[in-house]
Image: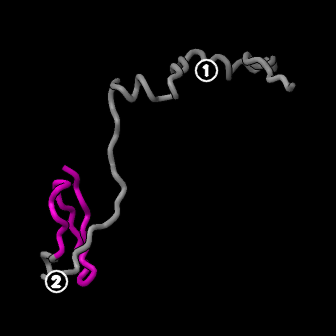
Amino acid sequence: MPIYAYRCSRCGHEQDVLQKLSDPLLKTCPACGQDAYEKQVTAAGFRLKGSGWYETDFRGGGKPAPKAADAAGGASSGSGSAPATPAATSG
């Protein structure tokens, strides 16, 4: 069930309410009793954790993540040689 933020436009009372999607919106402020209670627009807060579908299928656009040794080895050489990736050709 989502948590909705409500605020009274009359007295300024704010409250987070756990509601089902099918529950009607609250209209009456529990602090002042006026019909000025309004649902606020808030950012959703969630985090995808673990090695589930997001980590394996969508992170990085389907490309495997670079290994720590590859990322550190290529950047710290300092010899001034050309990068390992081929140069783009115009044509």
Amino acid under label 2?
Gln
Pointer 1 local density, CA inside 10 Å: few below 14, some 14–19, many at least 20: few
Task: Answer left or right for 76 relative to 87.
Answer: left
Name the residue that disc number 1 marks: 72
Helix, strand or loop under label 2: loop
Inspect the magenta stretch and tell me whether residue 80 lies in it: no
Query: Is residue 22 highlighted in magenta?
Result: yes
Name the image quarter holding residue 71. top right
Which percent across, then down, holds residue 65?
51, 22
Q: Which mark is residue 34?
A: 2
Which of these two is toward me, 65 or 53?
Answer: 53
13 horizontally vs 67: left or right: left
**In the displayed structure image, the side of residue 55 where residue 61 appears, left or right:** right
Please say if 31 is above or below 72.
Answer: below
Q: Nearer the viewer, mark 1 or mark 2?
A: 2
Specify start and end residues of the magenta stretch as a single range: 1-27
Q: Position of residue 5 (x, y in %)?
A: 26, 63
Q: Residue at x 18, y 61 (%)?
A: 17
Q: Earlier in the sequence, mark 1 or mark 2?
A: 2
Q: How is the image coloured?
A: one colour
Q: Residue at x 12, y 82 (%)?
A: 33
Q: Residue at x 53, y 21 (%)?
A: 63
Element on which disc 1 rests: helix
